[in-house]
Image (cartoon, rainbow, N blue to C red):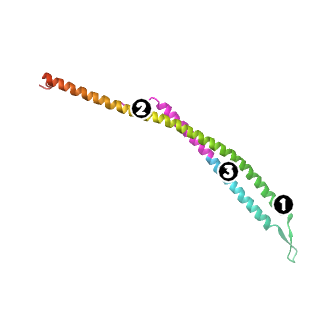
Amino acid sequence: MSRFVFRLQTVLEQREREERDRRVALSRFERARVEIEQRIRAYQQSIAQAKRDVSGHAMEPVGDAGAMRVNMRSMRLQANAALHLQIKAQMLVVRLAELNKDLERARLELSASRTRRRAVELLKEKAYEQWKRDQAKRESNEIDEINTMRAARKASGYRIGA
């Protein structure tokens, strides 16, 4: 019995590689997105902590009488630290927006490559089904030929082994 050979197998393999490459690219973008989101959350937590520190260090004791005064230097340092973190977080948000565009493009490319691969797979499935039908027809013809030859031998009186 013959073996099924798909004539577009190399095209199918190339489409599978293309799809795999697109999947890898998408996962890299996803990983970068997750990292940026984690960094933004860390900055937000640091900003919140800096704001709490500003309110906690705003007053400092003066003398023994329990008098308090505003520590402007400490407040300014904490406010500057919070502002610096806020600027970094905003820069990451802009980068995240750019990355989301790249992610969307990568998803579309993956979808397109998946569609191209699937089209070739459907061709392969159809070719395989046709090959199976051809094989069955060939086997049926061979059986018919054997039966015809057997009937012809019987009619002529020829016996095998006689």
- Residue ranking furthest to the top: 156
Residue 121 in the image: above or below residue 100: above
Please check the rendered image and state whether residue 89 is part of the magenta-colored stretch, yes or no. Answer: no
Whole-number angstrom distance, CA of label 1 to CA of label 2: 75 Å
Q: Amino acid at mark 3?
A: Ile
Of pointers 1 and 2, the one earlier in the residue sequence: 1
The quadrant of the image that shows the C terminus is top left
Image x and y of residue 148, in percent: 21, 25
Residue matched to label 2: 127
Of pointers 2 and 3, the one earlier in the residue sequence: 3
Of pointers 3 and 1, the one earlier in the residue sequence: 3
Displayed quadrant of residue 4: top left
Name the secondary structure under disc 2: helix
Residue in the image at 79% along x and 64% along y? 54
Q: Amino acid at mark 1?
A: Arg
Please check the rendered image and state whether residue 4 is part of the magenta-colored stretch, yes or no. Answer: yes
Image x and y of residue 32, in percent: 64, 47
Residue 36: image tag:
3
Whole-number angstrom distance, CA of label 3 to CA of label 1: 28 Å
Magenta-colored span: 1-29
Which one is in front in this view, the residue at disc 1 or the one at disc 2?
Answer: 2
Name the secondary structure under disc 3: helix
Residue in the image at 67% along x and 50% along y? 36
Residue 67 vs residue 96, the one in the foreground: 96
Residue 71 vs residue 134, the one in the foreground: 134
